[in-house]
Amino acid sequence: MISSSDSPVAAQLEAMLADVPNHLSGMLPELSVMGIINWGAAAAMVFGGVVPFIPQYRDIRRSGNTEGFSTFVCLTLLIANILRIMFWFGKHFELPLLAQSIIMVFTMLMMVKLCVQMKNKSEIVASKPHKFTDFDRGHFWQWTDFKSYIQFISLFTAVMALLTFLLLNNIIYVELIGFLAVFAEALLGAPQFYRNFKNKSTQGMSKKMVGFWTCGDIFKTGYFILREAPPQFWICGMLQVSIDISIFVQVFLYRNLPSRAPKFYSS
């Protein structure tokens, strides 16, 4: 047998083997119950945001009707999550929240694409085309082609990226976009609330979607508080839960009232 004194390589190998227990003990917290819970909570934050929209997506695809869903919900989440991504460059927060924003952007674009397709198919007589490049404020976010939505989101992202690059060291700007990001997300249910109020009906709106919203927002707000996220996150999270509950109140109030919505309503 070669002793450690006879071979430097053997001595290094012996030292590495002796240090294995220390490495294993450092890994044990990651494999503990709390470690598993933390990983589970992070995964829920990353993918939980898109779950509420699965039943609404399926309802629209099955019925071919977008009447009960406001695409301004998608606009709200697109703006909020793009701003949150920009906020991350100025003030790093947890990566699961960043990943959630990236996934949500693509999810909302999918929702918009489906709504545009179903809206165009449902028209017996094709309406006049409206595009983003028409710069008609009267038809903002009510364009008839999906390309226009991509153009607007691309322009908004480019402008915000440029501003963030130029003002990255300005603490006021960084905190402002952080607040606007979570405040916009807090108002996620506002377009749906207004649509229900205007129609005096919740017909066509997925109750499961709002239920998932409420459960997700309660979980998310608790996550923000426990993980000591920036104050903007949990303050606006509580506002978001309040709006979710208000929509459930509308379901109760309008359950026996006839809908005022036209047969084909432009989202």
Image: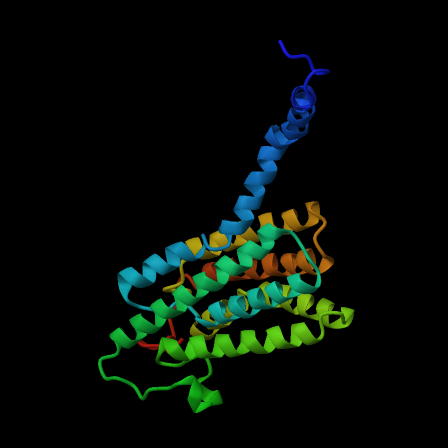
Q: In which quarter of the image is the C terminus?
A: bottom left
* Front residue of this view, candidates 74 and 267: 74
User: Could you tell me residue 196's position as x and y percent?
Assistant: 46, 69
The image quadrant of residue 81 is bottom right
* Location of residue 111 (image quadrant): bottom left
The colour scheme used to paint the residues is rainbow
236 is higher (above) or lower (below) than 198: above
Name which residue lies at 61% across and 64% down: 84
On the rendered structure, is 141 left or right of 21? left
Specify the quadrant that holds the N terminus: top right
Residue drawn 49% across the image and 88% down it: 137
Which of the 4 quarters of the picture holds residue 86? bottom right
Q: Is residue 146 left or right of residue 152?
A: left
Question: Is residue 249 something that shows in the picture?
Answer: no
In-image side of 236 versus 80 (left or right): right
Q: Which of 197 and 189 is in front in this view?
A: 189
Q: Where is residue 264 in the image (x, y as percent from the top left)?
A: 32, 77
Pick the front one: 129 or 122: 129
Q: Could you tell me which residue is drawn at 39 percent across and 67 percent down?
A: 68
Q: In this view, does 223 lie above or below 17?
A: below
- Residue farthest along the top direction in this orientation: 1
Can residue 24 be spotted in the picture? yes
x%, y% of residue 231? 73, 57
Q: In this view, does 150 lie above or below 23?
A: below
The residue located at (56%, 76%) in the rendering is 158
